[in-house]
């Protein structure tokens, strides 16, 4: 699976949009971009995933560049409860749940009042 | 969504003893389960993958005789830390999913914090 690069930390004001970048320049054609987050002392939580089109769900939006070498997770109106470590993972979707999720260092997002 | 539970949530033990951590899928059958370990201020590190009814596959550097994994049923996997030492103190997290289903349906447990004195 392709390696990802994320900034170690970011701050965001409460109520503003949080934009978390991820570089995955070696991504392969069959690899999806997955985002998870881990609130302190809890297990990770799935947020969203995408292949090449932009995606949106009730939690966030995912913007993937046309060349697929980078993506941005957008939390449209960040709240204090969104303070967490956000992980961008690139992997093949077809291997399903028998495939591993390899976590990088992630981005620690601090939402401030 | 699906729920994965872990028990205990926190355990303190003496050095040299063994500790068993349970991971249960509460409303689905988990054919595949993963065990992770997370040290303070570090990312999750995959320890092993287990498929129901077969032996676990351990990641490089993880001692299979020290971290015993038993995936005895479709809803339960256990991780036993044998002869625990202070350096085994960590946050242990499991995840569970169904074979054939996409990765976004893999769910994580809340974690077990182990402190070895």
Image (cartoon, coloured by chain):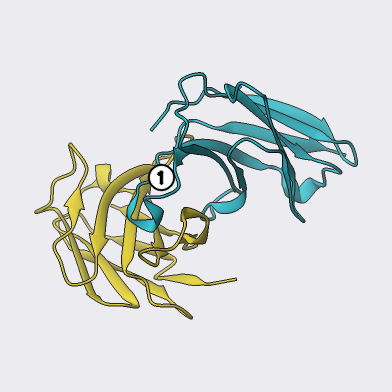
Chain colours: A cyan, B yellow
The chain ID associated with circle 1 is: A
The residue labelled by disc 1 is: A101
Percent position of residue A8, x then y = 59, 24
Res. A8 visible in picture: no
With A93 as the anchor, is B12 left or right in this view?
Answer: left
Q: Residue furthest right?
A: A15
Residue shown at 79%/46% (left/top)? A80
Q: Quadrant of the rendered structure where residue A71 is?
A: top right
Residue at x-position 71% and y-position 43%: A83
Quarter occupied by the N terminus of chain B: bottom right
Residue nearer the viewer, A95 or B68: A95
Q: How many marks?
A: 1
Could you tell me residue A58's position as x and y percent? 77, 56
Q: Nearer the viewer, residue B83 or B58?
A: B58
Residue at point 69%, 34% (across, down): A109
Residue displayed at 13% across by 53% down: B66
Residue B8 visible, this angle: yes
Q: Position of residue B91 (x, y in %)?
A: 40, 51
**Badge 1 density bin: few <14, some 14–19, many ≥20, Cα 10 Å:** many
Q: Position of residue B31 (x, y in %)?
A: 32, 69
Seen in the image, is B101 located left or right of residue B66? right
Give SS at disc 1.
Answer: loop
Looking at the rendering, which quadrant does residue B33 occupy?
Answer: bottom left
Is A70 placed above or below B52 here?
A: above
């Amino acid at each position: 699976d392709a390696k990802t690069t994320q900034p170690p930390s970011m701050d965001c004001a409460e109520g503003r949009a949080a934009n978390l970048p991820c570089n995955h320049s070696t991504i392969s054609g069959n690899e999806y971009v997955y985002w998870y987050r881990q609130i302190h002392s809890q297990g990770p939580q799935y947020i969203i995933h995408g292949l090449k089109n932009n995606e949106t769900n009730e939690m966030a939006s995912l913007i993937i560049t046309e060349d697929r070498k980078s993506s941005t997770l957008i939390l449209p109106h960040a709240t204090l409860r969104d303070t967490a470590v956000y992980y961008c993972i690139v992997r093949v979707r077809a291997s399903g749940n028998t495939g591993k999720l390899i976590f990088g260092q992630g981005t620690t997002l601090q939402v401030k009042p | 969504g699906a729920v994965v539970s872990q028990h205990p949530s926190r355990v303190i033990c003496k050095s040299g003893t063994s500790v068993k951590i349970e991971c249960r899928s509460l409303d689905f059958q988990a054919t595949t389960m993963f065990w992770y370990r997370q040290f303070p201020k570090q990312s999750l590190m995959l320890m092993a993958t287990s498929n129901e009814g077969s032996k676990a596959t351990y990641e490089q550097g993880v001692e299979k005789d020290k971290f015993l994994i038993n995936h005895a049923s479709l809803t339960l996997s256990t991780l036993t830390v044998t002869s625990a030492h202070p350096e085994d103190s960590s946050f242990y997290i499991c995840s569970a999913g169904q074979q054939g289903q996409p990765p976004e349906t893999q769910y994580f447990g809340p974690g077990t914090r182990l402190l070895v004195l």
